[in-house]
Image (cartoon, rainbow, N blue to C red):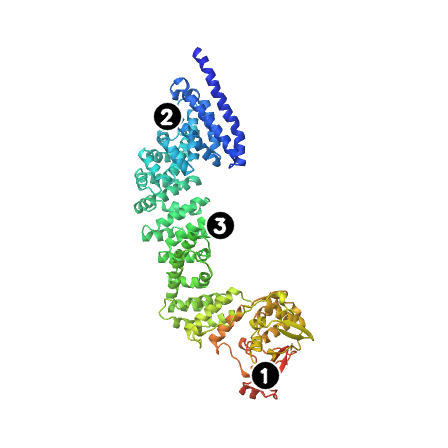
Amino acid sequence: MDSESVDMPGMQGIVEMVQSARATAVVDLTTATASPSGTAASSAPMVQCKKVVQALDAILQRNDKNPKHNVEMHVGLVRKCIRVVLDLCKVEDLLDVVAQSGVVEKVVEVLRVINPDPLERKTVPGTEELERDIGFIMGLMAIKVEHQQVIVDANALPTLVGIVRRYSQYGRKELTGVPAQNCRRTADAVTNLAHENNGVKNMVREEDGVVPLVYLLESIEPKVQRAVAGTLRTLAFKNEENKNLIVDLQALPLLVQMLRSDDSSIHYEAVGVIGNLVHSSQHIKVKVLDEGALQPVIDLLSSPCSDSQREAALLLGQFATVEADFKCRIVQRGAVPPLIVMLTSPDAQLREMAAFALGRLAQNPDNQAGIVAMGGLKPLLSLLDSNQANLQHNAAFALYGLSENEDNLIHFIRDGAIQIIREVQLGPQASRDCVLKMTRRLQDKLDDPVVGQILYIFKSSKKEQETIAINLGLLCTSDQAHPDPILVAYRFVKKGVHKVLATIVADIGASEKQHTLASVALANLARYSGIATTRPDAIVPPPEPNVFLGAPYVNKKQSSDVTFLIEGREFYAHKIALQANSEVFRSMFSGDYRERDAASIPIPNIRWPVFEAMITCMYTGTVEVTPDIAQELLELADQYMVVRVGPPTRLLLARPGRLCSLAPTCSRAHMLTRLFEPRLCRTTSRNSARTPSPSSSRPKTSRRHLISPRRLTPRSSPPRARSSASTAARTPRATRPTVERGVVRCRR
């Protein structure tokens, strides 16, 4: 009694320190969560940790007795101290504060004190709970790499491994409750300590920690199974000694059994362990497959757990490199359909791993046709547009494999693969190389049997004609691998591919993208089929208008240098803008014509809003066209050869209220006219000599007739009598001008 009464004052002081630390913990944790980076939020936890260190020191050194005895005598107070530290560690932003306070070393000291022999079972109540909480703290602190070494330097690892070894001696049914919780927390701590730390991985093996982990895979407690599997997964990653030891300890049969577990957390860890074991280890891949892992892994592709799906796809890609026949076996067992479904997943990692697996499987010719037949081509093509380098490369590699089979060429053409490749932005050089090799493979397969099949589909399927025509034309390039590209292109032309392309180019309702692709494809066919009468390198595109003065300068007298008379009113303009946007005005102001130096130029028979709309488009590039002026504006713009107004205004006639803008088909029309002249665009002198009246409908002429050159009145040419059509056809020189809807036009 006397000794007990002497001890009480010291014990009371310890109790007060612990209570003080616990009382401030609740308040400080709330503050730390609200402002974890603030000085006040970090200083208070530091004070708490210092109080915990003082309390633990007092308990360990109490009355100079055995420290283990002191802890066991006051295990409740020690647990309260440990709980204060654990609550702080649960706030990630406070981990650095805890590490700097020195409390981690003191906690490890407590763990070592109560475990002079880690294999000895605990008999004092509360001791295992204390071990569990300390293991939890070690696991949380080890999340940050910079704290791993602090724990290792405190010599915690041998004790943690010893605790795992102790629980491996338990019977399968004994490891439940608090022992199971303690085992799980300890295994998690070892996992985090060994993460990306090869030195710790070797230390665990040297401390004989791999053997108990493999044994604990047979535990009936799912959380224990998951925890030890996660530890083995970390230990096996890029460590050949650990991998071989795990395999030698007969872990593979247990891991394969876990693949069939209904618990997603268990089969996720199991497939992860197997994936790390087979990585860069061909002999382990063979052993895993001999244990019957192939079908369970394929089944995991349909798991509701996306992590398991991802790991299974990665593992199948690795299995595909074992032997050539394994690629076929994987496909035959039903791996392709779920992989194709994964290609469309919103999870980018799932798409990446699915493309990786399909790329490996596509190295087999029989698999290539099967993957395309099951619908894998379109999703892979869509992945080329990804901004993630790895995902894009995996998709490009898979497409490169699929292009090897000549039966797939038809699908590449029908699905628009060539135009998709042309449109996407390829990032890494590896992706560009795969796409280039794939294109050359497809070009090399343009032989007689395949071309015949494609052209048959082209003639029989009106719905797919445009896509097929564009992609066939795009394949006809100067660097194609086919030995006779001219013959191939000529066969396409004989079947009318060029006519479909020309129709797309002339279609004002087609999109800008379709116009561009069709123009390029048509130009390719023209070069290599012998249709073009002009060498491709001699084609000079028309000059692109590049002067836009802006809306404020429309009909602005200031700085204007030309005046038009419209309905008796003066309309001010600038020659530089007119010449840049109209071939007629360019000739008028740069040639030897009276209009060049005239004070004013009358434009008869044209309404003010129509002329103003045309000038506005020439000054700004766009103009709002209303239906009441659309037809007149179209005629006026065509006569003055204002390329920005024509096609959009034609579209407006069908869609009132549309904003007319730049007509990008003009330069392509010019190029194709030069390429296919005179075969695709025919102009007769009779049509050229005809001058329609304002009220009469315009004669139906070709594109060439609409952009045929006009001649203005030269200074030296006196008015002459009107000649007949036959005489005009023989006399190309300018004659007496006639007036037509606001433009000076001469008969020929």
Above-or-below relation of 746 to 474 = below
* Mark 3 secondary-structure assignment: loop
Q: What residue type is labelled 1?
A: Arg
Mark 3 Cα-neighbour bin, 10 Å: few <14, some 14–19, many ≥20: few
Q: Position of residue 436 (x, y in %)?
A: 39, 61
Q: Position of residue 168 (x, y in %)?
A: 35, 31
Q: What residue type is labelled 3?
A: Pro
Residue situated in front as seen by the camera: 196 or 57 = 57
Inter-mark Cα distance, 1 to 3: 71 Å
Name the image quarter holding the N terminus. Answer: top left
* Mark 2 secondary-structure assignment: loop
Which of the two discs, 2 and 3, sits closer to the camera?
2
Q: Position of residue 180 (x, y in %)?
A: 41, 30
Inter-mark Cα distance, 1 to 2: 114 Å
Q: Name the residue under label 1.
A: 715
Q: Mark 2 points at which residue?
A: 115
Q: Are marks 2 and 3 in contact (CB under 8 Å)?
A: no
* Mark 1 secondary-structure assignment: loop
